[in-house]
Image (tube, coloured by chain):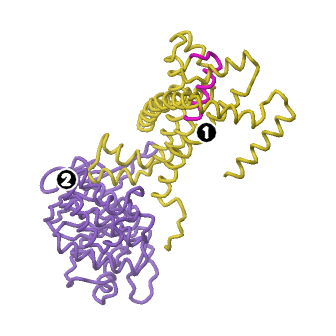
Amino acid sequence: MGGAVALTEAGQEFVRRGRTRLALQPTTLDIAPGEFVAVVGPSGCGKSTLLDLVAGHATPATGTVTVDGTPVTGPGPDRMLVFQEHALFPWLSVQENVEFGLRAAGVPEASRRSVASEWIGRVGLADAARLHPHELSGGMRQRAALARAFALKPRVLLMDEPFSALDAPSRDRLHVELQELWRETGTTLIFVTHNVREAVTLGDRVIVMSSGPGRVIADVPIQLARPRVVESRQVVDLAQHVRGLLDAADQMGITTPREGRDGYVSI
Amino acid sequence: MLVAGLALVVLWWLASLVAPTLPDPAATFAELGSMIADGRAWSLLWRTTVFMAVCFAVAVMLGVSAGLLLGARGSLDRALSPYLAALQGMPTSMWIPVAAIVLGTEIWSLAAVVSLGAVPAIMLATRTAVKGVPPLLVRAGRTLGESGFSLIRRVVLPAAAPGILTGVELGWSIAFRCLVAGEIFSGALSGTGIGDVISRSRETGDLTEMMATILIVLAFTVLADRLAFARAHARLRESRGLVDAGLPH
């Protein structure tokens, strides 16, 4: 079951060459247990910072971040982070990669093996369990990374543009599979992307962020039936709406040229 | 490999025609045969193996742990690096007379030089390799619940392994040079027997036994390379996908 994530006036700043830059304005955000939240915004909007705060890879400069009421003090296996690049250990096979976190958690060898095999099977890599990451395609690597994260039964799964480096067909399939895995496990999922349609396809809710300084500009509920696909009419319409919010918040006053009703943008 | 070896023997034979003091291959191989027959060759090989194995194991442990420390602590690295680089550049065999006087002309003094001689190379290679570990892998390791020593053992060390191995190989050749330099300095130092051969050749002026011993040492280094380093390299490269196995992508 998923965990409840709460950010209370959580902000982050970085000091570079003596100058303080606000990466994330103090932000308050409540995420219900088991919710699928997509976070979308241009580069530098603080969306990865937000993930880092929940993951415990960074401490907020102001405010607090809690999971199930407990303040986040560091990385922990209850909050799994899946990266844009697969981040699999190249010297380990798929099986060993998935077992890695289980071993760190002190799971005995026999159950480690069976849990890992189960998840490898669920992401469709049963035949590839003995292969090393370099022997897999991009989509297979990201599947292995998913299995590695899900195997630890995280209460919160954090995904940082996990599919942005994949080819479109792999991405479309993984969208559907991720929605299934999320439904089956009931984990809370925070999915960061710069792709508006992807956000609308996946999220129960789309948090729209803008840059300079990074801040939340909108919180759009998505109440379409699942599983959704990026091509669906309703997804495209809602993406159009979200895209409009992003354009309106752009201080430069530049609207990205779009053809017809296309809300599919990469910033 | 066999053809190349034969060609080298022919070259050696030609050289022995030009330089009469250089024993020809036939005499050397005869001497080698008698050394094998009466057990001298095995004793030499065995004692060298034990001495080098012990000294080198110490060197690898010291070098890798010091390298990890330097890699993790930037301030320490900045403070010590120039001196370590100087140590690595300096021929380590210069320490032999110092060690012989401080520690006495015993096996320990040469063992200390051979062990410590290899340390800077291993240490610096380890430091560089550790600094080159992709931060993403370390973050992944942390996310998956590892920290502290266990994170180093399960993520940092394997990720840095190819670089560390290069340092270990370099350290090995340095250690071996130290050993022979020590033997030339004083024959009884290491107890491997190479020094005794050197001093006998020095007295008699007959190089046949010396050449046979060189062959034994060569065989030893070839074995060490084939059995240890080449295999370790192949394994590391294969599992990381650095060998093109013709797989479809």
Res A108 label: 2
Which chain is mark 2 on? A
Magenta region includes residue B177: yes
Please state which amino acid type lies under the numbered disc 1: Ala
Tell me, what hue is chain A? purple
> Could you say which is closer to the camera, residue B228 or residue B121?
B228
Picture quadrant where residue A204 is located:
bottom left
Q: Nearer the viewer, mark 2 or mark 1?
A: 1
Report whether A124 appears left or right of B50. left
Where does label 1 land, which residue? B219
Q: Position of residue B33 (x, y in %)?
A: 65, 34
Chain seen in yellow: B
**Relative to A247, is A203 on the left or the right?**
left
Residue A217 visible, this orientation: no
Q: Chain of mark 1?
A: B
Residue at x-position 34% and y-position 87%: A231
